[in-house]
Image (cartoon, grey):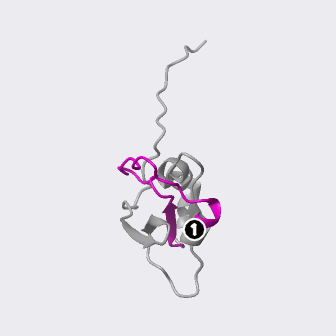
Amino acid sequence: MAELQEVQITEEKPLLPGQTPETAKTHSVETPYGSVTFTVYGTPKPKRPAIFTYHDVGLNYKSCFQPLFRFGDMQEIIQNFVRVHVDAPGMEEGAPVFPLGYQYPSLDQLADMI
């Protein structure tokens, strides 16, 4: 009988052969309710829809969506779309701590920011 061998499994999946890492363009836009940051992957193409994401509570676009978009089966899909990931105020990587007394935008205000 064959012996069992320990195998290490990593979370991050390497790029498929022939792929190069995507470059992202991060932008910050001031709104009446504060600054919103969004990151764009890919190049917009005429008459093609975009994939637009908005993360869950307490996360940012990387922690919420990176595992999905790095999944091997998603590579064929995402190469045909521009992706726009929006981070809620203060949720982007390296965001400063909100000052004392800061009033976080309501859900309606967050929607208006977009």
Is disc 1 placed on a helix, strand or loop? strand
Between 31 and 114, the residue placed more toward the observer is: 31
- Quadrant assignment, res 20: bottom left
Between 72 and 60, the residue placed more toward the observer is: 60
Between 100 and 80, the residue placed more toward the observer is: 100
Q: Is residue 74 visible?
A: yes
Q: Residues within 10 Å of mark 1 (few under 14, many from 20)?
A: few
Which residue: 43% across, 48% down? 14
Left or right of residue 78, residue 26 in this image: left
Asked whether 102 falls inside the magenta stretch, the response is yes
* Quadrant assignment for the N terminus: top right
* Quadrant assignment for the C terminus: bottom right
Asked whether 56 falls inside the magenta stretch, the response is no
Q: Which residue is mark 1?
A: 52
The residues colored magenta run 81-109
- Quadrant assignment, res 40: bottom left
Q: Residue furthest bottom?
A: 46
Which residue: 40% across, 61% down? 19
Q: x, y percentage for residue 4?
A: 55, 16
Disc 1 residue type?
Phe
Q: x, y percentage for residue 79?
A: 50, 69
User: In the rendered view, would you say 65 is above or below 2?
Assistant: below
User: In the rendered view, would you say 65 is above or below 26?
Assistant: above
Q: x, y percentage for residue 64?
A: 54, 49
Query: What is the total number of numbered labels drawn onto the structure image?
Result: 1
Which residue: 46% across, 49% down? 101
